Amino acid sequence: MAGRAAVPEVIWARPERTGRGPKPAFTRADIASAAVRLADAGGLDAVSMRHVAAELGCGTMSLYNYVPRKEDLYELMVDAVSGEHERFEPTGDWRADMLRNARQTKALMHRHAWMVRLMSGVYGFSPNALRYLEHCLACLDPLDAPNGTKIELVAMLNGCVTTYVSNELSTAERVRSLPWSQEQENAVRIAYLGSQVASGAYPRLAASFMEDAGPIDLDAVFERMLERVLDGFAPRG
Amino acid sequence: MAGRAAVPEVIWARPERTGRGPKPAFTRADIASAAVRLADAGGLDAVSMRHVAAELGCGTMSLYNYVPRKEDLYELMVDAVSGEHERFEPTGDWRADMLRNARQTKALMHRHAWMVRLMSGVYGFSPNALRYLEHCLACLDPLDAPNGTKIELVAMLNGCVTTYVSNELSTAERVRSLPWSQEQENAVRIAYLGSQVASGAYPRLAASFMEDAGPIDLDAVFERMLERVLDGFAPRG
DNA sequence: AGCGCACTACGTACGCTGTACGTAACTAGG
DNA sequence: CCTAGTTACGTACAGCGTACGTAGTGCGCT
């Protein structure tokens, strides 16, 4: 009768160690970083309980002493990389500070492409997420607006960055499980898109493709998006 | 030697029927609607090749005659519900039209809560997606801006709506696989969040919680978000 | 007309997943 | 010291996606 709790709980509310029995061999940070290592190297699908356990050098079921469900392992991973956010001293220029935060978020998600898949699904109030939110609010101190509005700003900015990176990387993560390369996948999809646009069924879309020949500058698109979001919260001039 | 192609392809480029052999028992629409039915009723996890085949009344492996990989089944599903978008006659007021589109997207994702999980991962140029994009561009005809900007507008608006609904429903989908109810899950998470905020480690966050007592009006938050996005694209006054 | 091939149908099997459960070793609190 | 709460982990099960082989079917070509 081991008595594993089948009761609702947040992993962050459960203490790391309770006191009785042998010392745990790992910390939560150990486990999270092992999982992150695997995901960085082999994509999110490489993160299975068995693989993580092997990476740590323990039996599969031993992991369940630390992490009651796989979902909680995901939460550990998200929290771990959330901790990579640099929480700098606010400069007093909330716009510049938030731009800096957003660019860092983008970089972080490029470093860990699997994050976009976890962001839509993980509830997201882990310790490091809260710290980051608090940091953003500190950056927004100079902005004259109700706290609720500031939180809406952070949510919207983060959401836009996530969606943007998600579009940018949409093939990057999924292609890992496919028996062909990302270049092939993209080529085939672009060929199909081209054939559809050329079919004449989508005149406005076709016009748009005619209009701007040459590759679009993704960084510029990103920066424009950020400016527009922030504009929506700037005090009326 | 059946010769199933292990070659990159988009399912939309593959013709539904080639002509030789017995008539297929189902259309793609049959399959998509069966899968959507299952997902609506039991969540995305209820959509397995076996279940969909059973719903259609055929053997599991027969499905692979229509859908080369599970991912393609997902694409069929997304395309099917994308077809639920009402493509109304543009009124000439691009703001009002886009608001209408956005509200419909939100309603659609509430009808099919599993969509948010598929949106970050499916490449998204299915026929109905293209039709919807073309419809949005038609709504934006009155807006004096380059086509590229209009596409950025549509992408940003859709992205914001998706992210918003994703946050709204984050527990709704995942809780299906849990042995307890959504109310319990939410209660536990909110209790934890409250304890953290009360700990004093997040003063600004705590201030924000003090400030606005009472439940927040989600619809108002949604509408504000839409207005802000559209503001970012309105011609400078 | 009839041959052949492309196609549908589907049973079996493989490797993988998350995880329930049982057992053995260990150690801090009463 | 004892015992209850932990850690550790092997075994086992149900379910997944799907590779492969085989049988039946009917269009297109010669």
Image (spheres, coloured by chain):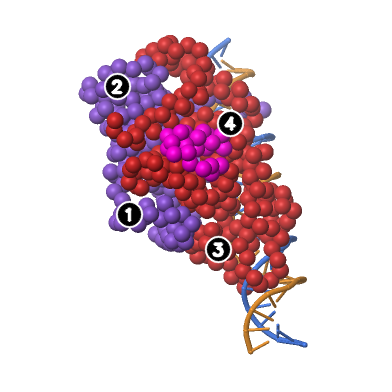
Chain colours: A purple, B red, C blue, D orange
Q: Position of residue A31 (x, y in %)?
A: 45, 36
Q: Position of residue B183 (x, y in %)?
A: 61, 23
SS category of the residue bearing label 2 = loop
* Viewer-nearest of discs 2 and 1: 1
Query: Does the magenta stretch mainly form a helix, a strand or a loop?
Result: helix
Q: Which residue is mark 3?
A: B14
**Magenta residues, start to end:** B86-108
Pointer 1 and pointer 3: residues touching (CB < 8 Å)?
A: no
Query: Compared with residue A13, is residue B18 higher up or lower down, i.e. above or below?
Result: below
Any magenta on residue B100?
Answer: yes
Residue type, label 4: Ala
Residue type, label 1: Glu
Residue type, label 2: Pro
Residue type, label 3: Arg
Look at 34% across and 17% down and name the residue there: A145
Seen in the image, is B181 located left or right of residue B105? right
Distance from the alpha carbon under mark 1 to that under mark 3: 29 Å
**Circle 4: is it few (<14), some (14-19), or many (20+) Cα within 10 Å?**
some
Q: Chain of mark 3?
A: B
Q: Which residue is mark 4?
A: B172
3 and 4 marks on the same chain: yes
Distance from the alpha carbon under mark 4 to that under mark 2: 36 Å
* Viewer-nearest of discs 4 and 2: 2
Distance from the alpha carbon under mark 3 to that under mark 4: 35 Å
* Viewer-nearest of discs 1 and 4: 1
Distance from the alpha carbon under mark 1 to that under mark 4: 42 Å
Residue A211, disc = 1
Distance from the alpha carbon under mark 2 to that under mark 1: 35 Å
